Image: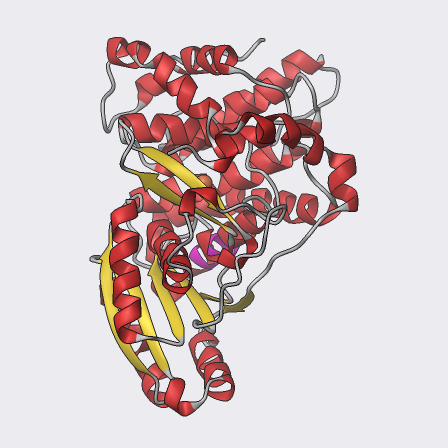
Amino acid sequence: MPTWYESQVIKDLMPILGARAVRGLETNFFLSRIYTGKSSLLKVARYLEATINKEDRRSLIITDAFTKKFVKNLDDMLKLIDMEYKVWSGVLPEVPVSTIDEGAKACKEYNPKVIIAIGGGSVMDTAKMVLVKYEKPEQNLFMILPSIGAALGLRKKIKYLIAIPTTAGTGSEIATAALITDTSRDPPKKIEVVHEELLADITILDSEFVKDLPPFLTMATGLDALAHAMGSFTTNWGNPYFDATNKTTIEEIIKYLPRSYKYGGKDIEARSHMQVASTLAAFGSYGNMAPGINHALGHSFGKIFSVHHGIAVSLFLPYGIAFKAKVTDRWTQLCPILGVTTENKSKNNLLKEFVQSLKDFIRSVDGPTCIKEIKEPKISKQDYFEKLDKLADYAMNDAVTLTAYRPINEELYRKIFEYAWDGGFIDF
Ligand SMILES: [Fe+2]
Protein backbone atom coordinates (compact mmCIF):
# COMPACT_ATOMS: atom_id res chain seq x y z
CA MET A 1 0.00 0.00 0.00
CA PRO A 2 1.51 3.41 -0.96
CA THR A 3 2.15 5.98 1.76
CA TRP A 4 0.89 9.58 1.75
CA TYR A 5 4.35 10.85 0.81
CA GLU A 6 4.43 8.73 -2.35
CA SER A 7 1.58 10.86 -3.73
CA GLN A 8 2.62 13.13 -6.62
CA VAL A 9 0.60 16.09 -5.28
CA ILE A 10 2.50 16.01 -1.98
CA LYS A 11 5.79 15.65 -3.84
CA ASP A 12 5.01 18.76 -5.90
CA LEU A 13 3.93 20.81 -2.89
CA MET A 14 6.74 20.00 -0.50
CA PRO A 15 9.53 22.08 -2.06
CA ILE A 16 7.31 25.16 -1.59
CA LEU A 17 6.27 24.28 1.97
CA GLY A 18 9.82 23.41 2.88
CA ALA A 19 11.42 26.61 1.63
CA ARG A 20 13.38 28.52 4.25
CA ALA A 21 11.28 31.68 3.93
CA VAL A 22 8.00 29.84 4.40
CA ARG A 23 9.29 27.81 7.32
CA GLY A 24 10.68 30.92 8.95
CA LEU A 25 7.10 32.14 9.27
CA GLU A 26 5.61 28.78 10.13
CA THR A 27 7.92 26.90 12.45
CA ASN A 28 6.81 24.62 15.24
CA PHE A 29 8.91 23.13 18.03
CA PHE A 30 8.16 19.78 19.56
CA LEU A 31 10.07 18.76 22.65
CA SER A 32 9.67 16.24 25.46
CA ARG A 33 10.47 16.88 29.10
CA ILE A 34 14.11 15.77 29.16
CA TYR A 35 15.68 14.51 32.37
CA THR A 36 19.44 14.00 32.22
CA GLY A 37 21.84 12.38 34.68
CA LYS A 38 21.92 10.07 37.64
CA SER A 39 18.94 11.60 39.46
CA SER A 40 16.64 11.51 36.44
CA LEU A 41 14.84 8.25 37.35
CA LEU A 42 13.97 9.55 40.80
CA LYS A 43 12.78 12.89 39.46
CA VAL A 44 10.53 11.20 36.91
CA ALA A 45 9.17 8.84 39.57
CA ARG A 46 8.17 11.77 41.73
CA TYR A 47 6.55 13.49 38.76
CA LEU A 48 4.49 10.38 37.90
CA GLU A 49 3.49 10.00 41.55
CA ALA A 50 2.25 13.55 41.65
CA THR A 51 0.32 13.43 38.39
CA ILE A 52 -1.20 9.92 38.23
CA ASN A 53 -3.81 8.69 40.70
CA LYS A 54 -2.78 5.64 42.68
CA GLU A 55 -5.44 3.38 41.14
CA ASP A 56 -4.22 4.27 37.64
CA ARG A 57 -0.54 3.53 38.20
CA ARG A 58 0.09 0.80 35.64
CA SER A 59 2.97 0.83 33.14
CA LEU A 60 3.57 -1.31 30.11
CA ILE A 61 7.32 -1.54 29.64
CA ILE A 62 8.29 -2.18 26.02
CA THR A 63 11.72 -3.67 25.24
CA ASP A 64 13.37 -6.10 22.86
CA ALA A 65 14.96 -9.37 23.91
CA PHE A 66 18.26 -7.61 24.62
CA THR A 67 17.06 -4.50 26.47
CA LYS A 68 14.73 -6.48 28.72
CA LYS A 69 17.66 -6.71 31.15
CA PHE A 70 17.35 -2.97 31.88
CA VAL A 71 13.89 -3.35 33.43
CA LYS A 72 15.54 -4.07 36.78
CA ASN A 73 17.02 -0.54 36.72
CA LEU A 74 13.46 0.81 37.00
CA ASP A 75 12.27 -1.53 39.68
CA ASP A 76 13.11 0.75 42.63
CA MET A 77 11.59 3.76 40.95
CA LEU A 78 8.32 1.98 40.17
CA LYS A 79 8.05 0.34 43.60
CA LEU A 80 8.68 3.67 45.28
CA ILE A 81 5.51 5.12 43.78
CA ASP A 82 3.40 1.92 43.85
CA MET A 83 3.39 1.64 40.08
CA GLU A 84 2.49 -1.83 38.80
CA TYR A 85 4.13 -2.90 35.58
CA LYS A 86 4.14 -5.54 32.91
CA VAL A 87 6.91 -6.16 30.38
CA TRP A 88 6.31 -6.80 26.70
CA SER A 89 9.62 -7.61 25.02
CA GLY A 90 8.43 -8.54 21.55
CA VAL A 91 10.14 -5.73 19.62
CA LEU A 92 12.04 -6.86 16.52
CA PRO A 93 14.70 -4.93 14.55
CA GLU A 94 13.33 -2.63 11.81
CA VAL A 95 9.82 -2.76 13.33
CA PRO A 96 7.83 -5.12 11.10
CA VAL A 97 4.17 -4.09 11.16
CA SER A 98 3.05 -7.43 12.66
CA THR A 99 4.94 -6.71 15.90
CA ILE A 100 3.05 -3.45 16.34
CA ASP A 101 -0.24 -5.37 16.39
CA GLU A 102 1.17 -7.75 19.01
CA GLY A 103 2.28 -4.83 21.19
CA ALA A 104 -1.11 -3.15 20.87
CA LYS A 105 -2.75 -6.41 21.95
CA ALA A 106 -0.53 -6.57 25.05
CA CYS A 107 -1.45 -2.97 25.78
CA LYS A 108 -5.17 -3.64 25.41
CA GLU A 109 -4.99 -6.59 27.79
CA TYR A 110 -3.18 -4.63 30.49
CA ASN A 111 -4.81 -1.20 30.08
CA PRO A 112 -1.80 0.86 31.25
CA LYS A 113 -1.66 4.60 31.94
CA VAL A 114 2.01 4.82 31.02
CA ILE A 115 4.13 3.23 28.29
CA ILE A 116 7.84 3.04 29.03
CA ALA A 117 10.12 2.23 26.07
CA ILE A 118 13.61 1.02 26.95
CA GLY A 119 15.91 0.42 24.00
CA GLY A 120 17.23 1.74 20.71
CA GLY A 121 15.37 3.16 17.74
CA SER A 122 13.32 0.05 17.00
CA VAL A 123 11.96 -0.12 20.55
CA MET A 124 11.11 3.59 20.60
CA ASP A 125 9.46 3.43 17.20
CA THR A 126 7.49 0.31 18.10
CA ALA A 127 6.27 1.99 21.30
CA LYS A 128 5.09 5.03 19.33
CA MET A 129 3.17 2.83 16.91
CA VAL A 130 1.74 0.71 19.73
CA LEU A 131 0.45 3.92 21.28
CA VAL A 132 -1.32 4.79 18.01
CA LYS A 133 -2.76 1.30 17.46
CA TYR A 134 -3.89 1.01 21.08
CA GLU A 135 -5.67 4.35 21.12
CA LYS A 136 -6.82 4.44 17.48
CA PRO A 137 -7.06 0.84 16.21
CA GLU A 138 -8.70 2.03 13.01
CA GLN A 139 -5.80 4.33 12.08
CA ASN A 140 -3.90 3.37 8.91
CA LEU A 141 -0.26 3.81 9.94
CA PHE A 142 0.81 4.52 6.36
CA MET A 143 -1.54 7.48 6.08
CA ILE A 144 -0.61 9.46 9.18
CA LEU A 145 0.11 13.00 8.05
CA PRO A 146 2.49 15.30 9.93
CA SER A 147 1.37 18.61 11.44
CA ILE A 148 0.07 19.84 8.07
CA GLY A 149 -2.62 17.17 8.40
CA ALA A 150 -5.23 16.47 11.05
CA ALA A 151 -4.53 15.89 14.74
CA LEU A 152 -4.47 12.24 15.75
CA GLY A 153 -6.09 12.77 19.14
CA LEU A 154 -3.81 10.47 21.14
CA ARG A 155 -3.30 10.49 24.97
CA LYS A 156 -6.94 9.77 25.78
CA LYS A 157 -5.88 6.47 27.37
CA ILE A 158 -2.12 6.75 27.78
CA LYS A 159 -1.06 9.73 29.86
CA TYR A 160 2.69 9.48 29.27
CA LEU A 161 4.96 7.82 26.76
CA ILE A 162 8.37 7.62 28.44
CA ALA A 163 11.51 6.99 26.39
CA ILE A 164 14.71 5.63 27.88
CA PRO A 165 17.33 5.20 25.14
CA THR A 166 19.98 2.49 25.46
CA THR A 167 21.92 3.68 22.41
CA ALA A 168 23.23 7.13 21.59
CA GLY A 169 22.42 7.92 18.01
CA THR A 170 19.00 7.19 16.62
CA GLY A 171 17.48 10.05 18.61
CA SER A 172 14.09 8.44 18.35
CA GLU A 173 13.51 9.33 22.01
CA ILE A 174 13.03 12.93 20.99
CA ALA A 175 11.85 12.57 17.40
CA THR A 176 8.33 12.97 16.11
CA ALA A 177 9.09 10.26 13.57
CA ALA A 178 9.03 6.47 13.63
CA LEU A 179 10.54 4.11 11.08
CA ILE A 180 8.62 0.92 10.48
CA THR A 181 8.88 -1.81 7.85
CA ASP A 182 6.16 -2.65 5.39
CA THR A 183 6.74 -6.38 4.99
CA SER A 184 4.07 -6.69 2.30
CA ARG A 185 6.48 -5.18 -0.25
CA ASP A 186 9.26 -7.16 -1.89
CA PRO A 187 11.88 -6.44 -0.72
CA PRO A 188 10.37 -5.02 2.47
CA LYS A 189 10.35 -1.21 2.54
CA LYS A 190 11.09 1.19 5.38
CA ILE A 191 8.19 3.55 5.95
CA GLU A 192 8.55 6.80 7.81
CA VAL A 193 5.64 7.89 9.99
CA VAL A 194 5.81 11.49 11.21
CA HIS A 195 3.46 13.23 13.60
CA GLU A 196 4.06 15.48 16.59
CA GLU A 197 1.78 13.35 18.78
CA LEU A 198 4.27 10.48 18.43
CA LEU A 199 6.82 12.42 20.44
CA ALA A 200 7.59 10.89 23.83
CA ASP A 201 6.28 12.98 26.72
CA ILE A 202 9.27 12.27 28.93
CA THR A 203 12.83 11.36 27.93
CA ILE A 204 15.34 9.97 30.42
CA LEU A 205 19.03 10.28 29.53
CA ASP A 206 20.94 8.27 32.13
CA SER A 207 24.39 7.04 31.09
CA GLU A 208 23.77 3.86 33.10
CA PHE A 209 21.64 2.65 30.17
CA VAL A 210 24.32 3.28 27.53
CA LYS A 211 27.61 2.65 29.29
CA ASP A 212 28.01 -0.94 28.07
CA LEU A 213 27.13 -0.25 24.44
CA PRO A 214 29.57 -2.34 22.34
CA PRO A 215 32.09 -0.51 20.10
CA PHE A 216 30.30 -1.27 16.82
CA LEU A 217 26.99 0.16 18.04
CA THR A 218 28.76 3.14 19.63
CA MET A 219 30.28 3.90 16.25
CA ALA A 220 27.23 3.19 14.09
CA THR A 221 24.72 5.08 16.25
CA GLY A 222 27.15 7.96 16.82
CA LEU A 223 27.65 8.30 13.07
CA ASP A 224 23.87 8.26 12.64
CA ALA A 225 23.69 11.27 14.98
CA LEU A 226 26.37 13.00 12.91
CA ALA A 227 24.35 12.30 9.76
CA HIS A 228 21.27 13.85 11.41
CA ALA A 229 22.98 17.04 12.54
CA MET A 230 25.24 17.55 9.52
CA GLY A 231 22.65 16.45 6.98
CA SER A 232 20.13 18.89 8.45
CA PHE A 233 22.54 21.78 8.80
CA THR A 234 23.50 21.54 5.13
CA THR A 235 19.92 21.06 3.92
CA ASN A 236 19.11 24.74 4.37
CA TRP A 237 15.74 24.17 5.92
CA GLY A 238 17.19 25.77 8.98
CA ASN A 239 16.29 28.55 11.32
CA PRO A 240 18.43 30.02 14.10
CA TYR A 241 17.24 27.55 16.75
CA PHE A 242 18.15 24.40 14.86
CA ASP A 243 21.23 25.89 13.20
CA ALA A 244 22.66 26.60 16.66
CA THR A 245 21.92 23.17 18.11
CA ASN A 246 23.09 21.33 15.00
CA LYS A 247 26.41 23.17 14.90
CA THR A 248 27.12 22.46 18.57
CA THR A 249 26.05 18.87 18.12
CA ILE A 250 28.48 18.39 15.23
CA GLU A 251 31.33 19.83 17.36
CA GLU A 252 30.43 17.52 20.22
CA ILE A 253 30.36 14.41 18.01
CA ILE A 254 33.67 15.22 16.31
CA LYS A 255 35.22 15.64 19.76
CA TYR A 256 33.61 12.82 21.73
CA LEU A 257 32.70 10.01 19.33
CA PRO A 258 36.31 8.82 18.81
CA ARG A 259 36.80 8.70 22.60
CA SER A 260 33.49 7.01 23.21
CA TYR A 261 34.26 4.43 20.50
CA LYS A 262 37.76 3.75 21.83
CA TYR A 263 37.16 3.68 25.59
CA GLY A 264 33.46 2.75 25.84
CA GLY A 265 32.09 2.64 29.40
CA LYS A 266 35.48 3.58 30.84
CA ASP A 267 35.00 7.12 29.54
CA ILE A 268 31.67 8.16 31.02
CA GLU A 269 32.31 11.81 30.16
CA ALA A 270 32.48 10.98 26.44
CA ARG A 271 29.50 8.61 26.74
CA SER A 272 27.38 11.29 28.41
CA HIS A 273 28.34 13.89 25.83
CA MET A 274 27.41 11.49 23.01
CA GLN A 275 24.10 10.76 24.70
CA VAL A 276 23.18 14.45 24.82
CA ALA A 277 24.58 15.07 21.31
CA SER A 278 22.49 12.33 19.77
CA THR A 279 19.34 13.64 21.42
CA LEU A 280 20.12 17.15 20.20
CA ALA A 281 20.84 15.79 16.72
CA ALA A 282 17.36 14.32 16.57
CA PHE A 283 15.85 17.56 17.87
CA GLY A 284 17.59 19.36 15.03
CA SER A 285 16.59 16.88 12.36
CA TYR A 286 13.67 14.45 12.42
CA GLY A 287 10.34 16.16 12.72
CA ASN A 288 11.66 19.65 13.30
CA MET A 289 14.06 19.66 10.38
CA ALA A 290 15.11 17.35 7.58
CA PRO A 291 18.15 15.10 7.79
CA GLY A 292 19.08 15.40 4.11
CA ILE A 293 19.13 13.04 1.16
CA ASN A 294 21.90 10.94 2.71
CA HIS A 295 19.12 9.48 4.84
CA ALA A 296 17.03 8.63 1.78
CA LEU A 297 20.10 7.01 0.16
CA GLY A 298 20.93 5.20 3.40
CA HIS A 299 17.36 3.99 4.04
CA SER A 300 17.20 2.48 0.56
CA PHE A 301 20.68 0.96 0.63
CA GLY A 302 20.40 -0.28 4.23
CA LYS A 303 17.13 -2.02 3.57
CA ILE A 304 18.15 -3.70 0.31
CA PHE A 305 21.60 -4.86 1.53
CA SER A 306 20.83 -5.32 5.25
CA VAL A 307 23.37 -2.75 6.42
CA HIS A 308 23.03 -1.01 9.81
CA HIS A 309 21.14 2.29 9.56
CA GLY A 310 23.95 4.38 11.07
CA ILE A 311 26.58 2.88 8.77
CA ALA A 312 24.37 3.37 5.71
CA VAL A 313 23.35 6.99 6.32
CA SER A 314 26.82 8.17 7.37
CA LEU A 315 28.40 6.48 4.36
CA PHE A 316 26.22 8.63 2.12
CA LEU A 317 26.66 11.84 4.16
CA PRO A 318 29.67 13.19 2.18
CA TYR A 319 27.90 12.41 -1.12
CA GLY A 320 24.69 14.14 0.01
CA ILE A 321 26.56 17.26 1.09
CA ALA A 322 28.56 17.44 -2.16
CA PHE A 323 25.33 17.04 -4.14
CA LYS A 324 23.63 19.90 -2.29
CA ALA A 325 26.74 22.09 -2.56
CA LYS A 326 25.54 23.13 -6.05
CA VAL A 327 22.70 25.09 -4.43
CA THR A 328 23.89 25.98 -0.93
CA ASP A 329 27.26 26.78 0.59
CA ARG A 330 26.18 26.21 4.18
CA TRP A 331 28.70 23.36 4.39
CA THR A 332 31.49 25.99 4.40
CA GLN A 333 30.40 26.99 7.91
CA LEU A 334 31.40 23.52 9.08
CA CYS A 335 34.97 23.69 7.71
CA PRO A 336 36.52 24.99 10.98
CA ILE A 337 34.92 22.13 12.94
CA LEU A 338 36.67 19.61 10.71
CA GLY A 339 39.91 21.60 10.80
CA VAL A 340 39.70 22.70 7.17
CA THR A 341 41.09 26.19 6.53
CA THR A 342 39.17 28.22 3.97
CA GLU A 343 41.71 30.86 2.84
CA ASN A 344 42.91 31.06 -0.77
CA LYS A 345 41.02 28.05 -2.03
CA SER A 346 38.55 27.79 -4.86
CA LYS A 347 35.07 26.70 -3.79
CA ASN A 348 35.48 23.39 -5.59
CA ASN A 349 38.85 22.59 -4.02
CA LEU A 350 37.52 23.56 -0.62
CA LEU A 351 34.55 21.26 -1.07
CA LYS A 352 36.85 18.39 -2.07
CA GLU A 353 38.96 19.00 1.03
CA PHE A 354 35.88 19.22 3.24
CA VAL A 355 34.47 15.97 1.85
CA GLN A 356 37.84 14.27 2.32
CA SER A 357 38.08 15.48 5.95
CA LEU A 358 34.61 14.22 6.66
CA LYS A 359 35.50 10.84 5.16
CA ASP A 360 38.72 10.79 7.22
CA PHE A 361 36.68 11.37 10.37
CA ILE A 362 34.25 8.56 9.51
CA ARG A 363 37.19 6.25 8.78
CA SER A 364 38.88 7.25 12.06
CA VAL A 365 36.11 5.41 13.89
CA ASP A 366 36.21 2.53 11.37
CA GLY A 367 33.10 3.61 9.46
CA PRO A 368 33.06 2.84 5.70
CA THR A 369 32.94 5.74 3.23
CA CYS A 370 32.15 3.79 0.07
CA ILE A 371 30.29 0.57 -0.67
CA LYS A 372 33.30 -1.55 -1.51
CA GLU A 373 34.85 -0.71 1.89
CA ILE A 374 31.99 -2.32 3.80
CA LYS A 375 33.25 -5.44 5.55
CA GLU A 376 29.99 -6.79 6.92
CA PRO A 377 28.11 -7.78 4.81
CA LYS A 378 30.54 -7.98 1.89
CA ILE A 379 28.73 -6.69 -1.21
CA SER A 380 29.78 -7.76 -4.69
CA LYS A 381 30.11 -5.11 -7.39
CA GLN A 382 27.90 -7.10 -9.72
CA ASP A 383 25.13 -7.52 -7.15
CA TYR A 384 25.30 -3.81 -6.25
CA PHE A 385 25.13 -2.57 -9.83
CA GLU A 386 22.33 -4.96 -10.70
CA LYS A 387 20.25 -3.38 -7.95
CA LEU A 388 20.88 0.27 -8.88
CA ASP A 389 17.38 0.77 -10.29
CA LYS A 390 15.75 -0.58 -7.15
CA LEU A 391 18.06 1.49 -4.96
CA ALA A 392 17.17 4.66 -6.87
CA ASP A 393 13.47 3.83 -6.82
CA TYR A 394 13.41 3.29 -3.05
CA ALA A 395 15.42 6.44 -2.38
CA MET A 396 13.15 8.48 -4.66
CA ASN A 397 10.06 7.29 -2.80
CA ASP A 398 11.55 7.81 0.65
CA ALA A 399 9.90 10.48 2.81
CA VAL A 400 13.20 12.33 3.24
CA THR A 401 13.31 13.00 -0.51
CA LEU A 402 10.39 15.38 -0.06
CA THR A 403 12.76 17.67 1.78
CA ALA A 404 15.70 17.37 -0.63
CA TYR A 405 16.85 20.96 -0.88
CA ARG A 406 18.19 20.48 -4.42
CA PRO A 407 15.63 18.93 -6.79
CA ILE A 408 16.44 15.30 -7.41
CA ASN A 409 15.14 12.46 -9.56
CA GLU A 410 15.75 8.75 -9.97
CA GLU A 411 18.48 9.27 -12.54
CA LEU A 412 20.46 11.49 -10.17
CA TYR A 413 19.97 9.08 -7.29
CA ARG A 414 21.24 6.28 -9.52
CA LYS A 415 24.32 8.31 -10.35
CA ILE A 416 25.06 9.04 -6.67
CA PHE A 417 24.75 5.32 -5.91
CA GLU A 418 27.15 4.57 -8.78
CA TYR A 419 29.73 7.07 -7.47
CA ALA A 420 29.38 5.67 -3.95
CA TRP A 421 30.68 2.27 -5.04
CA ASP A 422 34.31 3.37 -4.86
CA GLY A 423 34.11 6.84 -3.32
CA GLY A 424 33.87 9.08 -6.40
CA PHE A 425 33.59 12.82 -5.80
CA ILE A 426 30.10 14.10 -6.66
CA ASP A 427 30.83 16.56 -9.46
CA PHE A 428 27.39 16.94 -10.98
FE1 LIG B 1 19.08 8.28 11.27
In this rendering, is residue 380 above or below 376?
Answer: above
Q: Nearer the viewer, residue 349 or 188?
A: 188
Ligand 1's quadrant is top left
Q: Nearer the viewer, residue 67 or 188?
A: 188
Q: For residue 275: magenta?
A: yes
The dominant secondary structure in magenta is helix
Q: Nearer the viewer, residue 98 or 288?
A: 98
Q: Residue at x 72, y 33 (%)?
A: 19
- Image-based side of 234 in relation to 200, left or right: right
In this rendering, is residue 314 above or below 348?
Answer: below
Instruction: Specify start and end residues of the magenta stretch as a single range.
Output: 270-276
Q: Residue at x 24, y 65 (%)?
A: 88
- Image-based side of 366 in relation to 47, left or right: left
How far from the left and from the top, in percent, is residue 99? 26, 52
In this rendering, is residue 376 above or below 383?
Answer: below
In this view, the residue farthest toward the left is: 65
Q: Is residue 72 visible?
A: no
How far from the left and from the top, in percent, is residue 333? 70, 32
